Image (cartoon, rainbow, N blue to C red):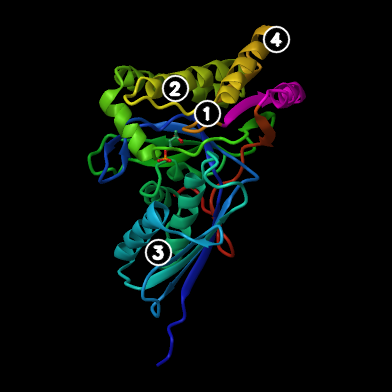
């Protein structure tokens, strides 16, 4: 019997850092967030994922970073494949290989890049021509932040209002080259602890238990509007204070969650303190910190302050490395067309 030729596709996708965080799901079935979020897609780092549907396979074969995936990580990939198979009307199992060119589970958002690349590769391999909004909608089922990694530059994921989720998708705000002076110096914390609780679970315990979560939801739309204006004007003095206000608010809802969520180490906290000191010394905001549900801290600044910021962060005990990244392009098919707005 002739073996069916596998249908295969490869995608690369970058991580992103949220300036306004996604934290809380209003509809778990449809993966709809409570609030809109805003992020910067990052260059230099990427996940590269190949999906090959092969009718001769008895089960899905998933390799992450060269090793067979088991447990939760495997289940997440298989759930995405099942969703794509159902949409494409195919039954074939798949061989999935995914690699990151940065340390996995290091808190550098490998779920965003990984699921954006997986959604792109799986849908293309299944013969579904998904791009832009449609790909963003699919990617969010793997990981909410993955919906934003579909696009490059500055991206907004709109929570939408409709119960069916049709108005929930990410969209590009400004392209990667919009603000060439803006840089992100990532302070990598040595021996950063791996997450005890998955973000998807942790955020729902915040929704249930944090007494300040409602106030956060009320504040987010104004913050997004302020950030959009500041980014449009390429104005660090307008952007940086609101980035730190949002990060402090995110940390406050985490710390008031029961049981408490504490993602930072003493080195991370020292980075926040150093950024505050730099701004005090300069007499104006020249840098802004932000962090996700992890210990590493992203410090935004503009090129002319980068040498100072870099030197000050590198001198902090417990900081292993300061990695400088910039706004970069979104997900794209290797050997296929670039993904653009739908
Ligand atoms: O995309 P998830 O389910 O891994 O959650 C991401 C949560 C944060 O990184 C803390 C915030 C965000 O918007 O990226």
Residue for badge 4: 282
Q: Are marks 2 and 1 in contact (CB under 8 Å)?
A: yes
Give the alpha-carbon distance from disc 4 to disc 3, as whole Å: 52 Å
Do tag 4 and tag 2 residues touch (Cβ < 8 Å)?
Answer: no
Residue for badge 2: 251
Does 297 appear in magenta? yes
Element at badge 3?
Answer: loop
SS label for mark 1: loop
Marks 1 and 3 sit apart, C-alpha to C-alpha, by 35 Å
In front of the other: 158 or 261: 261
Report the side of 161 relative to 188 (left or right). left
Residue segment shown in magenta: 296-317
Residue 339 in percent (x, y) is at 52, 53
Between marks 3 and 2, how big is the CA–CA gap? Answer: 39 Å
Residue position marked by numbered label 3 in the rendering: 128
> Residue 90, how many percent across, how many down?
32, 71
Quarter assignment of residue 53: bottom left
- Helix, strand or loop under label 2: helix
């Amino acid at each position: 019997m002739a073996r069916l030729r596998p249908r295969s596709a490869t995608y690369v996708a970058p991580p992103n850092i949220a300036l306004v965080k996604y934290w809380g799901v209003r509809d778990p079935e449809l993966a709809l967030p409570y609030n809109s979020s805003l992020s910067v897609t990052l260059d230099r780092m990427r996940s590269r994922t190949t999906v090959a549907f092969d009718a001769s396979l008895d089960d899905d074969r998933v390799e992450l970073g060269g090793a067979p995936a088991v447990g939760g990580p495997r289940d997440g990939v298989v759930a995405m494949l099942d969703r794509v198979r159902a949409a494409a009307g195919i039954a074939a199992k798949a061989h999935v290989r995914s690699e990151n060119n940065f340390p996995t589970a290091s808190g550098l958002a490998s779920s965003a890049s990984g699921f954006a690349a997986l959604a792109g590769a799986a849908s293309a391999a299944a013969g579904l021509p998904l791009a832009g909004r449609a790909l963003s909608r699919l990617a969010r089922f793997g990981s909410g932040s993955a919906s934003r990694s579909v696009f490059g530059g500055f991206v907004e994921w709109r929570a939408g209002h409709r119960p069916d989720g049709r108005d929930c998708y990410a969209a590009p705000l400004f392209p990667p080259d919009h603000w060439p002076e803006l840089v992100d110096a990532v302070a990598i914390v040595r021996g950063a602890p791996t997450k005890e609780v998955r973000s998807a679970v942790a955020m729902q315990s915040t929704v249930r238990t944090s007494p300040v979560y409602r106030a956060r939801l009320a504040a987010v739309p104004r913050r997004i509007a302020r950030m959009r204006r500041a980014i449009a004007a390429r104005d660090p003095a307008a952007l940086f204070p609101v980035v730190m206000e949002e990060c402090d608010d995110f940390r406050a809802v985490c710390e008031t969650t029961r049981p408490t969520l504490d993602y930072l180490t003493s080195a991370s906290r020292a980075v926040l303190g150093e950024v505050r000191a730099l701004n005090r010394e300069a007499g104006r905001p020249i840098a802004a910190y932000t962090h996700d549900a992890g210990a590493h801290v992203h410090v935004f600044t503009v090129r002319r302050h980068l040498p100072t910021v870099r030197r000050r962060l590198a001198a902090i005990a417990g900081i292993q490395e300061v990695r400088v990244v910039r706004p970069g392009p979104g997900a794209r098919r290797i050997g296929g067309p670039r993904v653009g707005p739908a």
